[in-house]
Structure formats: C-alpha cells, structure tokens
Amino acid sequence: MRSLTDDEILESLRGEPAPLLPILHAFHDRDGYLSPEALKVISKGLRIPIADLYGTIDFYHHFSTGEGGHHQARVCTGPICCLKEGNQILEALRSQGATPMPCAGRCDDPVVVLKGNQALLGTSAENLQPRRSPLPPEAPTLEGFEECVFAHIRSPERSQFAGYRSTGGYNALEKACSQLSQEDLLSQVEASGLAGRGGAGFPTGSKWRAVFNAPGDPKSIVCNADEGEPGCFKDRALLDHDPHAVIEGMALAAYATGAERGFIYLRYEYPETYAILEQAINDAESNGFLGENILGKFNFKLYLRRGAGAYICGEEGSLLNSLEGKHPFPRNRPPFPVTHGFEDLPTVVNNVETLASVPPIVLKGADWYQCLGHDQNAGTKVISLSGDVNKPGNYEIPIGFPLMHLIQDWAGGTPSGKRVQAVTMAGLSGGFLAGEDLDVTLDEPCIRSKGSFLGAGGIMVFDETRDMVEIAHQAMEFFAEESCGKCFPCRIGTRRLSERLGGHAGPGELTQWLNEVEALGQTMKATSSCGLGIAAPLISDSLVKYFPEQVENHVKS
Amino acid sequence: MSNPLVDMEKPDVIFCIGTNMTECHPVAATRLKRAIAKGAKLIVADPRRIDLAEMADLYLPLTVGTDVALLLGMAHVIQREGLVDQSFVENRTRDAEDFFKHLGEFTPKWAQSICGVPAEDIEKAALWYGQGQPSAIYYTLGITEHICGVDNVKSLCNLALMTGNIGKEGSGINPMRGQNNVQGCGDAGGLPNNYPGFQAVTKPEHQEKFEKHYGRDIDLENGITKVTAFDQCGDGIRAMLIDGENTVVSDPDRNHCQHALESLDHLVVIDLFMNETTELADVVFPATSWAETDGVCTNTERRVQRLRAAVPPVGEAKPDWWIISQIAQRMNIPGFEFSSAKEVFNELCSLSPLYQGLDWDLIDKGEYQWPVPYKGHPGTPTLHQEKFENGRGIFTKVVYRDPAETISEDFPIWLTTGRRLQSYHTHTQTGRSAGIDYLLPGESLEIHPEDVMSLGLKDGDWCLLSSQRGSVKIRVEATARSPKGTVFSSFSFSDVPVNVLTGSGYDPVTQTAELKVCPVRIEPVKS
Amino acid sequence: MTPPTHLQNKQSDPDSKPQGQETLTLTLDGEEVTFFAGETIYEVAERHRKEVPTLCYDPRLEPFGACRLCVVELEGARNPVASCTTQAQPGMSIKTKTPAIEEHRKVLLEMVVSENDGIEVDPLRGYASQELSTLVDRYGADTGRFQGAQSGCSKFEDDNPFILRDYNKCISCYRCVRVCAEQEGDYAISIKGRGFETQITTEFDGLLKDSACTFCGQCVQTCPTGALADRKALRAEGQDGELQKTRTICTYCGVGCSVDLVTQEDRLVAVQPAMDGPANEGALCVKGQFAFDFVQNPDRLKKPLIRREDGELHEAEWEEALQRAADGFLKALDEHGRHSVYAIASGRAPSEAAYTLQKWIRSGFGTNYIDNCSRA
C-alpha cells in the first residue's frame, strides 16, 4: 500500500476534533520517527507553535525523534516485570537499541515488550511472542454475589459486535431510548450509587447531571483509558474482551447528558486494544449505535485517541490538555471538567470500568447494583491482582470483600506458600499495607483508615523474600520520572525522595534522614497540585511505618 | 489613532493594511496577538508575506500601490450585502448617497483585475469586516507613502463610516506612528499648515492669536512643504535649520536631496552624530540624546508622556530647545528666555486647545490622551465618540490611479521599502548599540526564489538594483516573503542607500513621497 | 536597586474598588474584608497587604499554580489551596500565615535552593532577578537540607549578545514560557522533558536566533532567579556605584513604551520595562530593550562644529557657533527676505524642540516655513 503524503495525513484528520495525537501517530507510524520536517509540517498545518510542539512531543515516552526509534524495543520494567525477567530481557536487547518503559499493564502475563505497534510477551529475550491478553480468571461462587462488568466477558465472541448483541448487548441503550427520559436515566445512575472506578470515587450520576445542567455546546464524553498506574490492568481486560460494553456505556452517558461527541483516550501501550476498539467503533456506528440519529433519539460521534506514554495523562486535566494538543500539564481546579472540560466545554470524564457498569445498571436496576456490595457497600470493584500470587489476574469482587480472602482463596496464595510481607494499594499510589493492616476489607473507608486508599484497584503482592526498600525506591523513581514538572513540591520532592530511597543522596544519619523524608512528604501531600505529588509520599511514609528496620539498615549502609 | 492601544485587544475583526506591525511597532503587535489568541479574526492586506500575514485568518496579497482598488471592491460588497450601518450613516455622515451610487461599478472582479487579490477573498474580507462587532482598521506607511496616500486613507474612512466602526470601543481607524514623537512634533506646530494644536494657519482667528502671543505679523498662507522647500533650495530657499534628521538617507531621491542641501547658503543641523546630512552643514550643534533630556513626547494614541534625563549629557551637548532659543536670542527675536523644558511645554499647553488642560506636572504619570480641553478633563482615549470634529463624517468618491511610475521593459520589477525589526531608521542609533549587528549584520534585497533563478542569481549573490534615478549594489536574499515580481529592502544602511532609487512621485495633497512603489531593474554583478 | 514593584509596593489602597462592581465579603486572617467578583484569593490578599510569597506569579500573566508558595488555609478544604489559582468566593474563611503554612513555604524554598548551584545573583541580571533570594532570606531557607541532583542545564553555547541562558539557576516556574506566549505572542520558548529533568527550550533545542525569538527580553525581565539574564547589563557587573532607575519613554517607534533606565554613577547600563507603563504594560521589543548604548557611544558629537575657510568642519566654542548660526540666518533674511529660511522639525526630539523651532520660524520670520520628517 502506498503510504500517505504529509498533506493527505493532515487533510484526513485536520477537520476532526482533537487532531494532534492521531496526526503525530500517523507520521510516527509512517516514518518510524517524528522528523524535524514532519514537526514543521504539523506545526504549520495545525498552527501550533513549533517550539510548543517540539517540547510537547518530548514529554511523551514513546514518540521517537531519532530515525527508526519507533521500532526499537521498549521493555517493561514495572514492579512486576522487574520481579520476573524484565531487567534481563532489557539487558539482552539493549545492544539493539532497547529502552526501558514503565509498567505497561500486563502484570498478569509478564514480561511485556513493545516493538512498533506490537506487544510481545515472554520470559526471555528469545521466546517473545504476541498473544491475546488474558481473560479474567473464573470467579469462585460467592453466596448472594454476581459479577457486574465481568458477567459476560468470558462468553465467546463477546468482543465482536454480533457476540455482544447475542449476549444482551445494546439492550440497555435500546431500553433507555425507548423507555427512559434523560431525567430517568440520570436518576437511575444516581440511585445506583455508582462511583468513579478510576480511583477518585466521585458519584457518576452527579457528574452526569452537572454536565447535563452546564451551559455550552457541544458537550463531550471522555473515556479515560489511559491506564498508567503500575499494577493496574483491568481496563485493558474490559476493552480487549468487552469493548462494546464501554461504548454502550458512553452512548448512555451521551444520551443522558446531551453530549454529541466522545473520545476514548487509550494508553499507548495497548496497541492490540486500539485495533479492537477501532473495529468495535466502526461496527457500532454501522449498526446505528453510534453516529447520527442513534435509535431515532440522539447524535453521538465517537473518536478513538491514542496516548503516547505519559502516566500523568491519566489525570483528567492532563488528559484533556493532551487531547487538545497542549502540553499535558494538569489543569488548575476549579473549574472542573463538568463545566470546563474538552475545549473548555462541559465534559464527562469517566473511567472504563465505570462506563462498563452502566449498561447492566440500566438493564437490572439501581437496587440490583446497590445490593451487589458486601455489607453496607454498593456495587463491585475490579481488582487487578499481581506479584507473588499463584493466580494473578483481574477479579471482580463485591466491595467490602476481605483482602486476604482474595489473595489466599481466590488467587491461590503465594507461589511457595511464603508469608505475604506487603501489598501495594491503588497500584503504587496507595503505598504499602503490611503486618496487621493486611487484615482489611476492600472498601475505601476501611483502607483509608489505614492511611491508604483503594483507588483504581491495583494490588501487588510481595512475599517475605522481597527487599521492600528497593521496591519503594523503584516506586518512587517511577513517580519521579512521571512527575510532569509543573508544581515544585512534586517535581523536586519525588526526585529527592527517590534519591534518599536509592541511597544516592541525603543524610547518612537516621534521624536526619527520617526528618528530611518526613518533611518532604508532608509538604508534598499538603501543597502538590495533583494526585501524583500527593500520593507519592505514601510510599515512603508506609515504608518507614511498616519496615523501620529495613530502613535503618538502608540508611546505615 | 482614533482609539487607544488597549482597544487593540477588543475587536472581533482586525483589518491590517500596509502595516508590518510585528517589526515596526512590535509592542503594539503584542496586543494584536493577544486579541487573536482570544479569538479575533485577522485580515491582512500587504504585498509581502510578512509575519502578520502568517498569523492572518485571511491574507490578501495585493499588488503594490493598488490599495484603492481593493478597498473599493470591499466597500462594494459591504453595500451589496446590506452591511451598511444605516443609522450611523444617517446621523453621523454626509454625502453617503453619492458615494453609494459611485460604488456600483467597483465589483470584486474589477478589483481583482487591478490588485490581483482573488475576488472571493475580497468578498470574504468585506463580509468579515462588515459583520465584525466591532471591526478595527490598523495601517501604517504602507497606506500613506504613495502618490494616492490621501485616497488610501479616505478609502479606509469610507469603510469605517459605512459600517459605523468609528467612535466606539475596539473599532476605529488607527494609523500607527512611526517615530517616537512624530505625533508630538505635529501637536507642537512643526507643520506648514498648522499652529500648535492643529490650529490652521489660514484661519484669521488663529493668526490673530499667535500674532498677539508672538508679537509680530505672521503669514495667513500655508507654508511650503519640505518637498517643495527642497525643490527651491538655492533659489527661493537660502538657509535651513534641520533638527535631528538624517534627511539625505531617509528621504527619497537621495541625489536630489543632497544637491538641494549643497546649494544652500547656510545650513545648520542639530544632531547626535555626524551623518550624511551633518556633513553638508555650515554649523553643527551637538544635541543631548534620549536618556540625557527632560521633555515631553506624544505617542501614537495621543498619550502625552514625560521623558526624564537619567545621565548627564556627553561633552557639551545641549537640549534642542536650548540651542534653538540661543540662536533666536542672538537674532534678537523676543520670547526665547526659556530656562527649562518645563517652561517651554507649559507655554505650548497655554496655546494649544488640545493641551489646554495639561501642564508639566499633570502629565507626570502619562495618564492623559489629548484632547484635554480644560483642567480637570480626564482626556480622550477614543476620538469621535459623540460627534466628529467637523460635524459629520464625509464620504469621499475615491477613484483608482496608477502609481507615478509603473513597471516597464526597462524597469520590470516593483521595489517596495520599509523597516526591519532590529534596526531603526537610518541605523545611526541601533547601529551604535552593541549586539544589533548579531541579528542584522547588513542590508539585503528580498526576492522571491523563482525570480532569483530567472534573474540568473543565487541566494547571497550581489546584484545591481537600478531605477530611473540611480543604482545601488545590494546582496540577494531569496525568500518567499516577497511575491513574484516585487522586491523589498529597508533604507537603514548607509552602504546600501536605497533612497537613491526612490522618489518617483508625491501625493498631491500631503506631498508624501511614494516610497512604497518604485519600478526597478535587477542585474547580476560581481561582488 | 529597588526590588520589583510587585513585591514591594504593588499594594494599592485596599478600599479602592473598580466602579460598578458588587462588593462581596470573605474572612481573611480573622477579619471580614471586601472583594470583587472574579478576583483570586491572592489578589484579595495582596490588596489587603498580606505578604503572600510566590515565585511563579506575574500579575500580567494567567495564574499558573506552579510554585505553591502562595498556598493558604481555606476553611473546609482538606488541603491548603493555591491562592493564585483559586477564585475568591463570598463567605470563604482564609488564613494566609499559619505556622503550618509557613513551614510548608520554608520547606518548598529549601527544596528550590537544593536544586540550584547558588541563589545570589547580581541585580543587573534583570528586573525580577532578586525575587528568589529575597524570599529565601525572608524564610531563612538556605539551610542545606534536601541535597541532591541539580536541575536545569545552562546553555552557554548560545552566544547571542543579549540573553544569557544560565539554566543552572532555573527553577521551572515557566514565567519565561508564559510571558513569551501570553504577553509577547511569540511562542519561542517551551518546555522539554518532564519532572526534575524539565528543561526550558526552544524549537529543536537550538539557539535563540534560530528560533521564533525576537529578543524582546521579556523572559529576562520576568525571571525570578536571574537564570535568564541581561547580558548587556552584565557588562557593568562588578563596577562601582549604586544602581539607580529613572522612568522615561522609549526613543524608538510611536507606541511610547515606558521604560526604566538603569544607571550606575554616570553610566547608562541597562533598560528595564516599566510594568505600569500605560502604553506597554511591561512589554518591550529588541530595540527598546537592548539598543540603548548609542547614548554614550564615543562617536557622539561633543562640541559644536563650524565649517571654516578650509571647507572642513572644526570643533568650536558654543558662543562662536551660535553667533555664526544666527548670523547666517540674519544674512539670508536680509538679502533674500523672510521666505528664504526654512526649518525642519524632528519627530525624534521632544515636543519642546518642535515648539521652539516653529516659534522661531513664526515669530522670527513671520512665515509658516516649517515642516517635519513625517513626510518621508
């Protein structure tokens, strides 16, 4: 096939909203890197200042500015791939230009290596193969509980349009359009108690209502699929195996709020998912569930946008800036996206899991969803469980389910039966839980009482053989590398904490060391402008709290 | 300017014509860029693809000297599309009916045949300008330095009057003044037709007022312009006092100019440096420079501001007003016993209705824009708000005229001249400031790359540039900023005296020279 | 040299208010105060003379929220809020200076000190160059805590004569990036990399002269650490004499930008923009900012010159030159009449020059034989 010319690429995408990322990817894919000439053409075509464009592409991990860079291997050196053979594979491939990348969301199937637009899996440099991402493990039966978002995910062909339809797909949208007013739908989502599943836990119904009420058109629905948190891979499972559920959730959100355009912002590291979603969007559109005059009721055009490797783009302000082609710094809040989102217009930003929960709620009712939770809690949560467990994977649990029950009974405990030394919460952002605090139930009130939080539901398990200071150092190094650089406490604080955990700088005397680490953490938590800088010190705080002896040995040596 | 500089951030639609603002008035251009960032639409008409053209939403690359045709075409569309502000035309203007009848024949197609801008772009520009709420016009010497400079300005006035874009916030007709105090110089009476405060010398009441103050008879006729004076040098004009102007380099037709000054009996020049003009003088006086002088200047938005001396004068340099007063005293002319700039300025205020409400101390913070007709008046940021100075705004039936000289077999290329960002005027000041040569080491002739090829030249070659009046040697710069068939150079460098070539004609009313259009020939030359 | 005005004396009368705006109230450090719709907490606090520190704030630019020094305690908020980016709301209760807030500010400043190789810089570097060192002194934050890697890498290979790019002293406040975009509209400066590795850059990380930079110097004048510095001013570094500022108007085009001339004894060493200049509001261009040293150039005419019998111009005393000038005009008047003398006024000289010149022609000869250079 003849490759597109510069003008053809620009012309095909310039008219769409949020054109910069797809244009950059088109040049990147065509040329194997972003050449200075390409940047100049894009700068001119989109009227983006060349200095801004140059600086902004440098912000992302995966845009190469060196010839052939796109096709050089990127090896995952996230916390779990590191426990396996990530570093060895990286060393083996380094001579061919391989570089490390942070957690690429395949912790249930390590190690992952990206080459061009292909994800390869294996445990050594020799046996790397492409393969489909794992389905969630079969859930054990639990009295009075059924899965919500995973209920049909294991049905064969569920990821295809026909298979989705034959298992009840788009029935919720049809029901809404034929039986529910916008108000009915908003009320139902409010009544279900569904809250943001990306970590912030904001009530979904309230968010939708705010957008419904906000002045300004067109409104947008943004699906946050920039699943960058290390140890989190639930969105990948949903989008790979049940993409139409997310699309249907977005269409319902659009119907409820009056939004006319939508975006799925997918992280770069899921190239296969991109292809699946592209197909799913085309199929949904050609079958009348997206596009013009959906079920005779509304218009909703959905665009797929691919990130380029930046953890901070999971933060909604950064994500919106990235979509708009701006430098992906977080935005100051307020105003919030519900009034000033994409292009400063009212915008719903929802997580993948949140959106996938909506169709079942519409079909089965708010009460049904309310009652899925454990004890007093509403609904379910997908936990991405990985690390030192026999059966890593995504588990949909009733909210309030005990942590150790999940690890020991559902996931089969640690491989050699060793003691669980610690787990992380919220991927890395919740820091560690250890000792007696492992005896928690998986709901925000309980976990917050231990100084952590459940967040997006990534839990990494470390057995008693692991060096917790080293794990904490890697975690902090991740935050330091992913800090966007906008606010001082995070930009400087993450670097200083990483240096202290890695032994590269800082006092050699324990009390002074502890004072500095505490002071940095306190100020970061109090003054950082977004969640990254606020969460990062939980790693150092919880390390000091649970593992004082390991810390003392580290400082002394 | 009819409107203040802050208004530049307020229009819906900005129409820039004959102004290279980002280079010549960079700080004003920053406001324009902010307006664009806030969503204002920018229309730029200029023969050259200047930076402003790159920022424009609509760029109209007209042939040099054809502004009237373009503007008539736009006026035609505004009328045809019913974008005329009827109530404004009715209440504030006159001669509208004649003018609208006059417009009938000037279709965009007709305009295209003269100015070269596609008719559909002329339509679009007219629609945008006509629909803007408000729209503002900005222009500079690209409009005035033509034999039809007055017609150009009147054409712009017609557009503003038709659409009611005058006298309100964010609108207006806004010429950008080129020199720091060219406005103040006119305000103070440095004109052959006006006393201070633009009081016409031909009105007997003004004559009487100044005769009384100055204690002698003064002509009731306008004086001759500088252009005429130069023509009469050695004949009617025998002595001249030039204050702070390197006339020989900055004026058109350098050879004529030099010859004129040489034929004087007595030439006195006040300046900071020796230059091509002081070289011809009988007496040269060293003036104090900016940074050494207390005084007042008035900017392009009519803001009257104080200059303050920060360092002592070099050598024995003296302020211009002091030098002139001392000469006057030695000629026994009364009324020159000034001991400070403050005294001079306060006398000016007392005689100018525009400055009547001002004095030296009041303008300490630069808060006032004239007219300030009485003490306590807040000043007038926007002109013509309630009414025009002369009652009603007058529509003028302008017609297109060719430039004084048009391209021919002998001189087949248009030359247009202007300034560059890093250099000022004849470079006597910027050229003596460290570092400027890093940005602009010398002059060059901007030629479209295809023309460079067809002339048998390469980027960086030397060429001989000739007009009917002379030739200069200049380096070639191949750039698409110049359209095909038109070349550009500044007049900043004395080793490339481009004004040897210019001076083909003058506006019949103002006698402003047609510096923006000059047919030339380009020939290769060995360096 | 006096500190930047927006640190020192920006506080206007707290009771003055824009006309026609509704007056709202909130509680500031226990006192009920008024504010206007649309004001940020920082602006309200400034107006009421609270000393809220900041490093990323420039009143001409959109609030950005990078340095976090301006955080205040807001009743009901879980964390302190950045006062520069938070709109004031009626009924808010705000504390600008609790011990906890002051401690965070000190820690933040200690962090900033730790990323640089030194914070004391010559005030010649630029208008705002003392902001960081002033705050570090105020908070006693030069404690040596938090040592580690240095951020920012100076680009000394950029040998342009105007702007020193000493990024070793950069604290990533992005004022230069923002002023270039928001104030100047040039978009020449941008941000490369991220986190601690963030670097101020231009297109393709090249030299300023190969970028969209117009050398207006705005980035220099807003830099709070002197990382971007006025190279021409630094020629006076180490010389004797107090620095003084004199307010005047730029000598170049007709915009009429207000500037402060920086002098040292009798030497003109730099130009700085006047942030409260009515025409420019702090903006300048390359000529206004950097093309000033013609004033004390050795080529300046220092004495009057008279053309003598040899046909050459020679230096002369004032009395002789003035008399010679006067005599020449009297002779023309005498021999050829009053319409034989002409004067050309300057659009570059102050109005007093034009006024005296036209008065000389009109009251000396009774003609209107005067014009000026605006016709060229």
Image (cartoon, coloured by chain):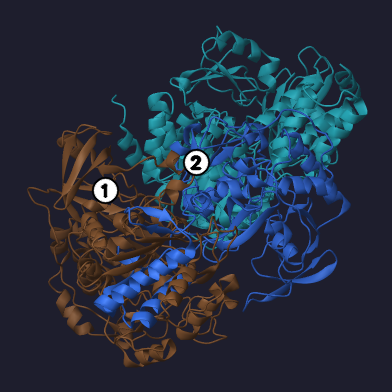
Residue B291, image x and y in percent? 55, 59
Residue underneath mark 2: A52
Mark linked to residue A458? none
> In which chain is the residue bearing label 2?
A
User: Would you say residue A170 is visible in this rendering?
Assistant: no
> Quadrant location of residue B36?
bottom left
- The residue located at (38%, 86%) in the rendering is B387
Q: Nearer the viewer, residue B116 or C289?
A: C289
The tint chain C carries is blue
Marks 2/1 same chain: no
Residue underneath mark 1: B488
Residue B497 falls left or right of residue C300: left
Residue A501, image x and y in percent? 79, 25
Q: Which chain is cyan?
A: A
Residue B28, image x and y in percent? 45, 60
Q: Residue furthest front?
A: C309
Compared with C331, A102 (above or below) is: above
Which of the image's four quarters has the C terminus of chain A? top right
Q: Which chain is brown?
A: B
Q: Nearer the viewer, residue C319 or B513?
A: C319
> In which chain is the residue bearing label 1?
B
